[in-house]
Image (tube, helix red, strand yellow):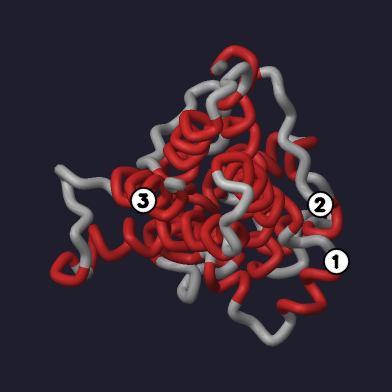
Amino acid sequence: MQNILSNITITVNPKLFVKNPETSDLGKKIISQSIILINEIGFEDFTFKKLGEKIGSNESSIYRYFESKHKLLLYLCSWYWAWMEYRMLFSITNINDPMEKLKRAITIVTEKVDDDTKTQHINEAVLNQIIIAEFTKTLLTKEVDEENKEGFFLVYKSVINRLITIIEEVNPNYSFSKSLASSIVEGSLHQHFLKDHLKSITNCNENNSPTDFYIELAYKTLKK
């Protein structure tokens, strides 16, 4: 699977950037170093000025690629979910049993992420930490409805829709397939956050992962 994934180009909504960062060394550097910097200092304190200092380039050069740090975060999130969708699709290829297919799909979207060295300018493990801590900030804005119309969350919704389809294969009579699928994807991020920061209010720990929790939840919810 990894060899196939390494040959796939992740496509991101072109409305999220001024110039495609994948088309130049500077653009790739902006992506790689923004991931590191956002993870280090948090999105609130992240600025293009600080990023420019980190990459040794003028702040204005970053604006040639992204019009705002919000659009940059949306870009990173879209890239992440597109990467997740590819991994999910390959994990369930040629799997006929619906429950086994669901287990594999849940595992992909909820497990701890390791860096894929084949994508040299993107550290997926660090990006995953950003998604856990910062992804909801792309949704909880006054502009979310307009940005949704622009297709900024299309890939994120596609990942959830893949899960919905599998859930309906497992139990066609279950009435809340959409709510369950979105809860698995969004809830797993929250459980990872709690596991790392607010440990007293989650059962997830080094021995019981969010993946274990959501597989058991799905199995017990959907069994006929």
Closer mark to the observer between disc 3 and disc 2:
3
Which residue appears at 78% of the width and 69% of the height? 148
- Is residue 78 shown left or right of residue 96? right
At which x and y percent is residue 198? 21, 70
Residue 73, image quadrant:
bottom right
- Is residue 99 shown left or right of residue 201? right
Alpha carbons under labels 3 and 2: distance apart:
37 Å
The residue type indicated by label 3 comes to Lys
Is residue 216 among what the camera can see?
Answer: yes
Q: In the displayed orientation, state which residue is furthest to the bottom.
A: 142
Closer mark to the observer between disc 1 and disc 3:
3
> Which residue is identified by label 3?
220
Q: Count of labels shown?
A: 3
Instruction: Tell me whether circle 1 and circle 2 mark residues in contact (CB < 8 Å).
Output: yes
Which residue appears at 74% of the width and 56% of the height? 61
- Is residue 58 shown left or right of residue 196? right
Closer to the camera in the image, 159 or 215: 215
Alpha carbons under labels 1 and 3: distance apart:
37 Å
Q: Residues within 10 Å of mark 1 (few under 14, many from 20)?
A: few
Residue 126 versus residue 59 in the image, above or below: above
Quadrant containing the N terminus in the rendered view: top right
Which residue appears at 77% of the width and 40% of the height? 11
At which x and y percent is residue 143? 74, 81
Residue 113, image quadrant:
top left
Q: Residues within 10 Å of mark 2 (few under 14, many from 20)?
A: some
The residue type indicated by label 2 comes to Asn
Alpha carbons under labels 1 and 2: distance apart:
9 Å
Q: In the displayed orientation, state which residue is furthest to the front.
A: 224
Closer to the camera in the image, 189 or 169: 169
At which x and y percent is residue 101? 53, 31
What secondary structure is marked by label 2?
A: loop
What secondary structure is marked by label 3?
A: helix
